[in-house]
Image (cartoon, rainbow, N blue to C red):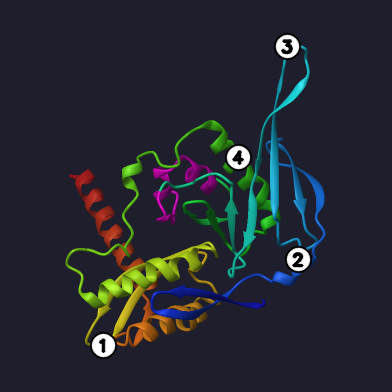
Amino acid sequence: MHRQVSFFRSRLGTFRAFKHLGSVSSRNNAVPRAVKMITPGGRQFTTLLSNDSATLPTFHKNHLYKTKGGLSVQKRTMFIQTEVTPNDDALRFIPGVPVLDSGNTMEFMSPREALKSPLAIRLFGIDGIKSVMFGKEFISVVKDSDTPWQLMKPDIYAAIMDHFASGKPILKDPSQQKASSTDIAEGDSDIVAEIKELLETRIRPSIQEDGGDLDFVSFDESAGLVKIRLRGSCRGCSSSTITLKNGIENMLKYYIPEVQTVEDASDELEALAARELEKLEKKLESEQQQ
């Protein structure tokens, strides 16, 4: 992978944040070719494939209906752009229409969590899906390492296309979308407010471009320790440590001297959530036996 340096400018000056992207040269030099694809359900697709089989830049599906004269007329065409991420097991799908109303993201880690969203439920019905994340204008999908994208992409396209064609909402209850953890709260100290501002305005947009996101967890002022949680394509990615240290930590330390180090608390929080879920299941099981 080539390393691309993204430049950002703020009221504090100019700084750099490193991020790892898919090979730019391979995308630019690829010659697209039209390929017809058929899903197991019989849906037909025409897609543009580059010579790099791991990259699928554009997709479209035509909905046809018959007029009184018996002619087939194109009812709707939708293009879904697909972008690679630093994680080989994650892709970023851009349907060209708004996904979530706000700039915050929403992640689903299991079929149970996906019950909040008709589209997430549909995506989790595809073999190999590990997690799904919605952003304002993108859908990030993470798969297991054993299932190739070539087998999954047609069904993912069909799920996204059919959902937006149906007119159903993304979330069954829009109020279930939580506020961003980087929103400045009334009781935040000045340092925490500065940390959240940098995360929200400078770091999160860059990470979301790669199909990921992060949550602010805590700041220990005595140790200078900032804890965050990486989500989406950033979770478990081989380059997540580089992103954490070269990008997030260096930026926060440069502008906020009180920050000494940044750690990913994803595993810690997931273990805590698993313990709480186990307690709840045991409690429900005990109540049913009584």
Nearer to the camera, 180 or 161: 180
Which residue is rendered at x = 43% and y = 78% of the image?
248
Q: Position of residue 233 (x, y in %)?
A: 52, 64
Figure quadrant of residue 162: top right
Tell me which label, 3 or 1, sits earlier in the chain. 3
Q: Which residues are magenta?
A: 102-124
Secondary structure under the numbered disc 4 in the rendered image: helix
Secondary structure under the numbered disc 3 in the rendered image: loop
Nearer to the camera, 81 or 191: 191
Q: Is residue 35 left or right of residue 65?
A: right
Q: Amino acid at mark 1?
A: Ala
Tell me which label, 1 or 2, sits earlier in the chain. 2
Secondary structure under the numbered disc 1 in the rendered image: loop
Which residue is rendered at x = 69% and y = 71% of the image?
23
Q: Which residue is mark 1?
A: 223
Above or below for 204 versus 42: below
Nearer to the camera, 216 or 87: 216
Figure quadrant of residue 159: top right
Q: Which residue is mark 2?
A: 28
